[in-house]
Amino acid sequence: MHNYNQLMKDFPLNDLLAATDLPKIASSIGAIFRHISTKLKLSPYPIRRALPLVTAISRDFNDALLRVLGTGKLMFMSWDGFERVMAGLGDVFAAWDDNMKEFTGIARDRESASAETVLGLLQGEEADTSLLPSASHSQAGGEVHPDQDHACAR
């Protein structure tokens, strides 16, 4: 459990929650995902638990954008002001996309590494082959009872 707490220690979420402009949102997203990436590489925190965390960060990201954009009236801005806001939004969403791609890559690497470890253990000499699905199990789409197999042969 102590290793799991490492992910949440010094988590920089307050930067996103307190952001008052688009550049601060972009930098806070970068800081959050750098923290997550670093901690996931160093700790055994399960990826399946990290996914809901990233979903919650996405909601906070959305809330921060609405809070910052809600203060200005986009329809009544000058064209130059509107273009600056749109350029800032482009930077914010580029930061989000880049960080999500990096997180997705780390998650895939961790999942494939753990899958390879499990497969390596199952295929080893000491593996209990009774835990592996039989050919009749995979062909029938479910577990086949010995009597059912015998009854089908009649």
Image (cartoon, rainbow, N blue to C red):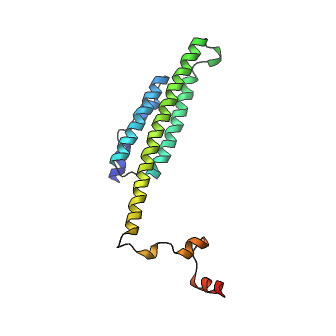
Answer with the quarter of the image where residue 71 lies. Answer: top right
- Seen as rendered, the residue at the extreme right is 154
Front residue of 42/16: it is 42
Query: If the image is split into quadrants, where does the N terminus sit?
Result: bottom left
Give coordinates of residue 9: x percent, y percent.
35, 42
Pinpoint residue 60: horizontal percent, then vertical percent.
51, 35
Vertical relation: 50 (above or below) 12: below
Residue 77 versus residue 59 in the image, above or below = above
Q: x and y percent of residue 3 in the render?
A: 33, 51
Residue 94 in the figure: left or right of residue 40: right
Q: Position of residue 114 (x, y in %)?
A: 40, 57
In percent of the image, x 54 and y 74: which residue is there? Answer: 135
The answer to whether residue 129 is above or below residue 118 is: below
Q: Is residue 88 left or right of residue 128?
A: right
Give the farthest residue toward the bottom: 154
- Horizontally, residue 96 falls left or right of residue 8, namely right
Q: Residue at x 55, y 33 (%)?
A: 62
